[in-house]
Amino acid sequence: MKIKVGIFDSGIGGFTILNSLLKTRKDVDVIYLADTKRIPFGNKNCKEIRVIAEEICSFFEDKSLDAILIACNTTNACALDILENNLRIPCFDLINSVSEIVNKKIIGVLATQTTTRSSFYKNAINSKKENLKIFQQECPEFVSEIEKDKINFNKLNYLADLYLRPLLNENIEELILGCSHYPFLPKNRFKYKNY
Ligand code: DGL
């Protein structure tokens, strides 16, 4: 018997997580919600994200799900409690899961404006490991560029430089892509090959 899993994001970002799930599990049926009408989430404040989270719960309410995989860091950061309380099924918490596998001392986090300002990553990591240096960088323009039909490599290169420079200046040893859209960034086209 298959497990019915709900996955949501503001757009295509959650496909990065969906792909990983489908590679490792054959026993899942997935309902994927892309809230493209309200993308980007990352420039909205936490209060607005919490209202969106309520509506996402209403969408999934009658879908007889066994679990929810939170594929949006921004919603995870602002409204995990709403998802857990309203849906009352296991909610796989993206940020806390990522925080578990940090294993270096100087960490960089690239994330949306709202995730960064919530400091959810920083707090989650600090609650598990001691004496780490964590540097967060918000990337307000990445998501809308990644969602475009035609990727503008020059613009992405410029933005990558802009957003990564402050973290590289801190000599980070590990980088968290704290937004599910970012694994779509075409790494080999960028000047920095090792992030
Ligand atoms: N992909 C989502 C995240 O992980 C939301 C990005 C957005 O819509 O700004 O935060």
Image (tube, rainbow, N blue to C red):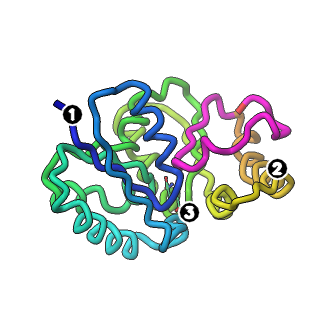
Whole-angstrom CA distance, mark 3 to mark 1, is: 37 Å
For label 2, the crowd category at 10 Å Cα-Cα, with few meaning under 14, some 14 to 19 and many 20 or more, is: some
Relative side of 166 to 139, left or right: right
Q: Which one is earlier in the sequence, the residue at label 3 or at label 1? A: 1
Q: How many marks?
A: 3
Which amino acid type is shown beneath numbered disc 3? Answer: Gln
Relative side of 152 to 80, left or right: right
Q: Residue at x 51, y 59 (%)?
A: 11
For label 1, the crowd category at 10 Å Cα-Cα, with few meaning under 14, some 14 to 19 and many 20 or more, is: few
Residue corresponding to mark 2: 157
Q: Please tell me whether mark 2 sits on a helix, a strand or a loop.
A: helix
Task: Give the camera-side residue of 127 and 98.
Answer: 98
Q: Is residue 91 above or below residue 24?
A: below
Residue 19 percent coordinates (x, y): 47, 36
Q: Please tell me whether mark 3 sits on a helix, a strand or a loop.
A: helix
Task: Give the camera-side residue of 78 and 151.
Answer: 151
Start and end of the magenta stretch? 172-194
Residue corresponding to mark 1: 2
Q: Is residue 5 magenta?
A: no
Q: Which one is earlier in the sequence, the residue at label 1 or at label 2? A: 1
Q: Quadrant of residue 97?
A: top left
Q: Which one is earlier in the sequence, the residue at label 3 or at label 2? A: 3
Q: Residue at x 50, y 24 (%)?
A: 103
